[in-house]
Amino acid sequence: MKHLSILLFLVLTFPAFGQPGINEMNQASQQLTSSFFSAFDCSLVIAAILGLTGAVRIYHNWQMGKREITADVAAWFYAAIFMVLAGAFLRALFGI
């Protein structure tokens, strides 16, 4: 019992160094911030590409005589909106 109380006393008297990775966490946060903005820009570029290709496809179908293009227009519109909002959602999710 005497050894247990001495061991417990020694363990409780040493300061706790439980957070040695603070600098690494700050560095990871900075790297996430720098790479996230490029990912956000990439999502905007993908949205622009989807928008242009969808517009060309819909225009082609319209010129070829296909008059029922409402489903294509909706798919084109929502794909572009999704890509734009995905970047904003990720920005809000990670607090960047």
Image: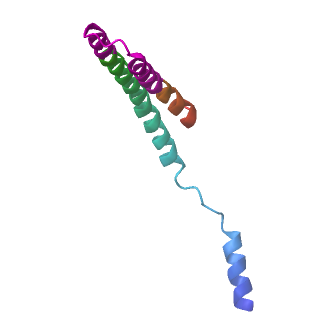
* Residue 4 x %, y %: 71, 87
Q: Nearer the viewer, residue 21 or 77?
A: 77
The foreground one among 20 and 85 is 85
Q: Return the residue nearer the eye: 40 or 52.
A: 52
- Residue at 51% x, 42% y is 26
- The type of colouring in the image is rainbow
Tell whether position 36 is magenta.
no
In-image side of 60 versus 76 (left or right): left
Q: Quadrant of the N terminus?
A: bottom right
* In the rendered image, the vertical position of residue 49 relative to residue 86, given as above or below: above
Residue closest to the far top = 63
Q: Residue at 71% of width from left, 71% of height from top?
A: 12
Tell me the quadrant of the picture where the C terminus can be found. Answer: top right
> Measured from the top left, where is residue 53 in percent x and y?
30, 18
Q: How many circles with numbers are drawn on the protein?
A: 0
The residue that appears at 44% across and 32% down in the rendered structure is 36
Q: Position of residue 20 (x, y in %)?
A: 54, 55
Above-or-below relation of 5 to 23: below
Which residue: 45% across, 37% down?
A: 32
Q: Which residues are magenta?
A: 55-84
Query: Left or right of 6: which side holds 77?
Result: left
Residue extending farthest to the bottom is: 1
Residue 68 in the magenta stretch? The answer is yes
Our reading of the magenta stretch's main secondary structure is helix
Q: Quadrant of residue 58?
A: top left
